Image (spheres, helix red, strand yellow):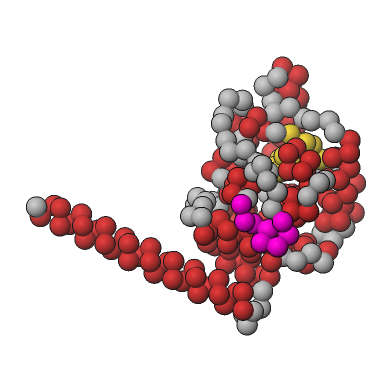
Amino acid sequence: MKAFYLALGLFISACAVANRAGDFPPVILDGETMELVEGEAKKILAVTEKPETARLYTFYLSRFNGKPFLGLSIGNQRIYIHYELARRAKENVGYLWFLRRTLAHEIGHDMAGHAPNLQALSSVVSAGSTAASIASHAPGVIGLAAGAANLVIGLAGTATAAVYGKSAEMEADRKGIEYWKKVGWDCRIWVRSFKFQFDKGMMGDFRHPIDERLYQSLELCLDKSDPERISIEREIKEAEEKRIEEQRRKSQEERDSLRD
């Protein structure tokens, strides 16, 4: 682990040099917005398993060169947050909840001691990539996930896939939800955002399986008897049965075409 953090230190130093050269995603200085980020982060850090480390955390604002990230933990208590997400969180409570979710997820990574893939991180900081922008309209508290496809893709998009593995992503979600519950925030927001992605066919990738993340959030946030959980589980089951039936149909069509 010591060797990893030595390498990480060299990586961060290289990033600092690249930043001056204009290649690293520029860190945006906005005191008012950073005050909001740090204030929300403190609420989460206070309920973690290591609240005494809160003072060690450093947060940065960035647009990630247009890449689809809402947040990124690079280890050693260093976390980047998308500037537009944080800026809009000052003005709209919907974005504020997504900021809180992002912070909890990234803090979960760090608290778990997840070691990011340095090679993948180097691709994150390189310029020239095109990605979906944050949605131009802010979701409301009720039905928070509706209309937020571009916003939530930062936690599910393929651009983040190689930085952490599947088990790390699932654990970061789990820890994030646990922190939310301790703070007293309604973690149904996690369920509904994953459900929104599931409904839109945004299934993530093998490191970010939306169906598994949705199941996990259901188990952690809602009782088995909760009507919302029952309804979502039924929809997931029906969607899976439909997917299997569609695969069978296509396979049959392929076999029939081969006979012809």
Can you tell which quarter of the image residue 58 is in? top right
Residue 12 position within the rendered picture, expressed as x and y whole percent measured from the top left: 74, 30
* In the image, residue 63 above or below residue 100: above
Predominant SS of the magenta segment: loop
* In the image, residue 217 above or below residue 124: below
Question: Considering depth in this image, is 171 or 23 the residue closer to the camera?
Answer: 23
Q: Is residue 245 visible?
A: yes
Residue 136 placement, left or right of 161: right
Q: Residue at x 52, y 59 (%)?
A: 198
Residue 119 placement, left or right of 100: left
Q: Residue at x 73, y 27 (%)?
A: 26
Say if the magenta span includes residue 260. no
- Span shown in magenta: 140-147
Count numbered badges in the picture.
0
Residue 246 position within the rendered picture, expressed as x and y whole percent measured from the top left: 32, 62
Q: Residue at x 63, y 50 (%)?
A: 148
* In the image, residue 125 above or below residue 206: above
Residue 168 position within the rendered picture, expressed as x and y whole percent measured from the top left: 63, 53
**Residue lying farthest to the left in this orientation:** 260
Question: Considering depth in this image, is 93 or 74 the residue closer to the camera?
Answer: 93
Residue 56 position within the rendered picture, expressed as x and y whole percent measured from the top left: 87, 44
Q: Which part of the image, by quadrant, shows the N terminus?
A: top right
Question: Considering depth in this image, is 20 or 200 the residue closer to the camera?
Answer: 200
Q: Is residue 170 visible?
A: no
